[in-house]
Image: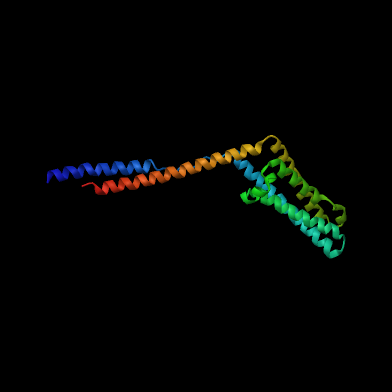
């Protein structure tokens, strides 16, 4: 009888110690946010907003050209500008399916030149709408914002900042995968220790 009591006394602290160890070795670790990647995400957001503004300005101009009969060629020109602006947005998502077939969009210099082209197309033929100040203001804001984004992309591409971003992304993905694997191992360890405790006589 006394021997059973002693074994119970020994088993209880062991269970408490194991539970404490398991809880302390299974932290909810999270990788630190990279300031460079955060800055790149903010800049991509600004570029997408500028592209959307270019799309709105060009769609409005195209509809007005076709409906009012001002210049059918200007309307076609605006339609091309909308399509290219959509490509700019897709390039900012860095969708692997797109970069696989359009390798130039993977490089920042290529994206920058495409954005500058959209800015020029958006700003072109603005004298046709001299009586509409709202559309002129929208075209100016969209085109100059897109032009600034394109110039920044070209300069950053020349400085090889795109390669730095991709290296940081790969490093962050590796860290996240390592933390996930560690958490799975700790969870498995806790399950095995719980089974050992249950099997203890």
Which residue is situated farthest in the top direction here? 159
Query: Most extreme residue toward the left, as rendered?
Result: 1
Decide if residue 87 is on the left or right side of residue 24.
right
Residue under the image location 74 percent in, 46 percent down: 114
Query: Residue lying farthest bottom?
Result: 67
Residue at (75, 55) in percent of width and height: 82
* Residue at left offset 63%, top offset 41%: 39
Residue situated furthest front in the rendering: 101
Residue situated in front as seen by the camera: 45 or 84:
84
Pick whichever, 128 or 98, lies toward us: 98
Total numbered badges shown on the rendered structure: 0
Residue at x 67% of width, y 45% of height: 103
Pinpoint residue 130: horizontal percent, then vertical percent. 87, 55
Q: Position of residue 34 (x, y in %)?
A: 57, 39
Visual colour scheme: rainbow
Q: From the top left corner, tell me how far across and down residue 31 is, in percent.
A: 50, 41
Residue 154 lies, in percent from the top left, at: 72, 39
Indicate left or right for 156 with 201 as reference: right
**Is 38 drawn above or below residue 89 in the view shown?**
above
In the figure, residue 33 lies in which quadrant?
top right
């Amino acid at each position: 009888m006394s021997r059973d009591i002693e074994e119970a006394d020994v088993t209880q602290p062991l269970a408490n110690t194991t539970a404490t160890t398991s809880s302390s070795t299974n932290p909810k670790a999270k990788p630190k946010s990279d300031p460079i990647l955060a800055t790149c995400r903010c800049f991509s957001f600004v570029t997408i907003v500028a592209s959307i503004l270019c799309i709105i300005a060009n769609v409005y101009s195209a509809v007005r050209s076709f409906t009012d009969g001002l210049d059918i060629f200007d309307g076609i020109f605006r339609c091309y500008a909308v399509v290219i602006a959509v490509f700019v947005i897709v390039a900012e998502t860095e969708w692997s399916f797109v970069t696989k077939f359009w390798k130039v969009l993977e490089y920042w210099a290529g994206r920058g030149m495409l954005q500058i082209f959209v800015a020029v197309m958006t700003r072109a033929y603005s004298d046709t709408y001299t009586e509409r100040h709202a559309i002129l203001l929208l075209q100016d804001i969209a085109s100059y914002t897109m032009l600034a984004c394109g110039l920044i992309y070209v300069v950053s591409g020349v400085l090889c900042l795109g390669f730095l971003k991709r290296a940081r992304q790969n490093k962050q993905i590796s860290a996240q995968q390592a933390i996930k694997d560690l958490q799975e191992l700790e969870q498995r360890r806790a399950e095995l220790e719980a089974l050992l405790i249950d099997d203890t006589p």
